[in-house]
Amino acid sequence: MTTQEFQALSPDTLAERLGPIDAIRDRLGDPKDWTMREVGDGNLNLVYIIDGPEGSVIVKQALPYVRLVGESWPLPLRRAFFEYNALKRQDERDPGAVPEIYYFDEDQAIIAMEFLSPHVILRKSLMEGKRHDGLADVLGRFCARTLFRGSDLSMPTAQRKADLALFAGNAELCDITENLVFSDPYFEAEMNRHTPQLEPIVAALRADSDLKIAAQHLKMAFANNAETMLHGDLHTGSVMVTDTETRVIDPEFATYGPMGFDIGMLIANFLMAYYAQPGHAEAEGARANYQNWILSVVEEIWGTFTAEFTHLWRTERTGILYQASLFEDQGDALASEQARIERLAAIWRDCLGFCGIEMHRRTLGLAHIAEYDEIADDAARAACEARGLMLGRALAVGRVNFTAMTEVTDLARRINQEDYL
């Protein structure tokens, strides 16, 4: 397939191209009664909502380039193939956590899936100061179940190695992560951007040898430590919520990597939302209680993750690693528990390191977060961002010094009282 054969969807062609597909028509009704809305606000893809007399469907199509940048940055259409396969595996490993897939066209890079309504993007909800019951439980379990069940702790080794080979093909999106996340923020990369008032802090971070070495150690871990299938881009823009329900979307960056990566990236986005709250508050101090709620979610995500990981370790450890034949079957359950504690400690250190690097790249690199960018006043925005940068540095460089998530959230509160500009 070539890019010349590829045809981007448009509101004028959606009914003609997708109307003949039974799986879509059965959920929408007669194509002549469809209405279409283009809702994609991400960096890479076209996204449409199709409403019909029988229901609604989301249609996502990859483009042969980075939408945020344009045709000067080509990307392969096969990233839709990896997203489709990741969603299928995530649904098997944590049923109900991701949208149901109705249709996939590999040649045209189209995925038609369940329309989540009245769900909204979590990032937007956090900017509005809304709370969501069960949010931390769902996200903590999702991370534990998908990361554990996609690894050699659980999977049959032949199947796991086949999956590793399959997702290794998602090389171009891994390249984006490896450069935009781990390297570009720490030098004057062409596509970087940051709030001008941050310039002194940016200069200090780029001259910080300990930080740059930490970032490259973490980059090496991401590139080489293929522990499990990752979502690869798990942040608050990849989560949809109602008051009581949480679902995870958009795993097109799926690859094999360290277990701490997904949960570290996710927690980083909550911590940045915490620092951004003054920029969205109705009055000074009006979001203080909400900020505390965000930090409680961070603590609960990690607590739920460790509890679920522990449960899976004790009940589903059927892979080639830490076999029960070496421990429980010999009456040595204590050694198994010691191994579990050591594994979780390694994931914890990785989690904090990746968390810190994510807080830097979302402030200094190409792809920022709306929580910061939608603060209109440059000085107010820079004050929020500076605090996030300082916490990110502390986590990336000092990740071995933290023993509990409450230590992280306590440091976040202390940093929130400082003015770094």
Image: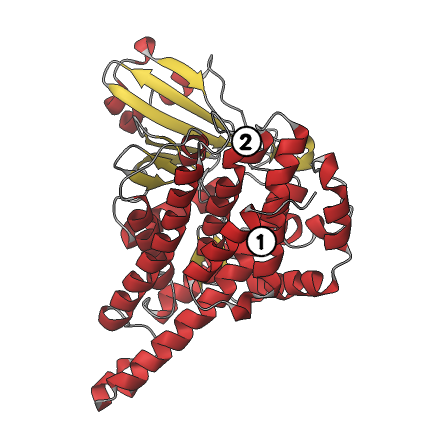
Residue lying farthest bottom?
A: 330
Which element is circle 2 on? Answer: helix
Residue 149 appearing in the image: yes
Identify the residue at horizontal 58%, vertical 53% (top origin): 391
Q: Where, by quadrant of the figure, is residue 57 drawn? A: top left
Tell me if 369 is positioned left or right of 155 in this view.
Answer: right
Residue lying farthest top?
A: 32
Which of the pair 311/6 is nearer the observer? Answer: 311
Marks 1 and 2: CB-CB under 8 Å? no
Which numbered disc covers residue 279?
2
Tell me if 325 is positioned left or right of 38 in this view.
Answer: left
Tell me if 167 is positioned left or right of 65 in this view.
Answer: left
Which of the pair 201/248 is nearer the observer? Answer: 201
User: Which quadrant would the N terminus be assigned to in this image?
Assistant: top right
Identify which amino acid the numbered label 2 is placed on.
Gly
**Which of the two discs, 1 and 2, labels the residue nearer the N terminus?**
2
Identify the residue at horizontal 33%, vertical 30% (top origin): 119
Identify which amino acid the numbered label 1 is placed on.
Leu
Q: Position of residue 399 (x, y in %)?
A: 55, 66
Which element is circle 1 on? Answer: helix
Q: Where, by quadrant of the figure, is residue 162 drawn? A: bottom left
The residue singled out by tag 1 in the image is: 391
